[in-house]
Amino acid sequence: MREPRRGARFLSACLTAAAFLSALLLLCSRGFPAFSLGSPLATVPLGGANEALIYLMWESRFPDMLAQAALTLLAAAACISIVRLWRR
């Protein structure tokens, strides 16, 4: 397999840097979108929030775990195929 030319590497590095800088500029100019749809209607007492937070975070984790496992297997398969192509 042929080695990519220096110009192609430079172009890909420039495009990557431009995408990263534009995303960073967008984040810095508009801020993180916390409460972008409005503010909370009521405050919750600290004791109640601590008890509810556990259930909010860990109540339905099964779909998340399945998605994480699928993405891990997909990333491993992609890495193996890239290494096989690189060795040829």
Image (spheres, helix red, strand yellow):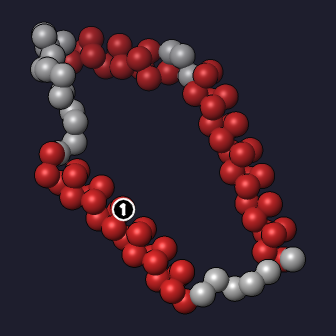
Q: For the C terminus, give its image quadrant.
A: bottom right
User: In which image quadrant can residue 53 be found?
Assistant: top left
Residue placed furthest toward the right: 88
SS for dot 1? helix
**Residue type, numbered disc 1:** Ala
* Lateral position of residue 55 relative to residue 20, left or right: right
Q: What residue sits right under mark 1 in the picture?
A: 19
* Lateral position of residue 84 relative to residue 45, left or right: right
Between 32 and 60, the residue placed more toward the observer is 32
In this rendering, the answer to whether 3 lies above or below 82 is below
Residue shown at 27% from the left, 60% from the top:
22
Q: How many residues crowd mark 1 within 10 Å: few (<14), some (14–19), many (20+)?
A: few
Residue 4 at x, y = what percent?
64, 83
Residue 29 at x, y = what percent?
14, 52
In this rendering, the answer to whether 56 lies above or below 31 is above
Residue shown at 27% from the left, 11% from the top:
48
Q: For the N terminus, give its image quadrant.
A: bottom right
User: In which image quadrant can residue 24 be found?
Assistant: bottom left
Residue shown at 74% from the left, 84% from the top:
2
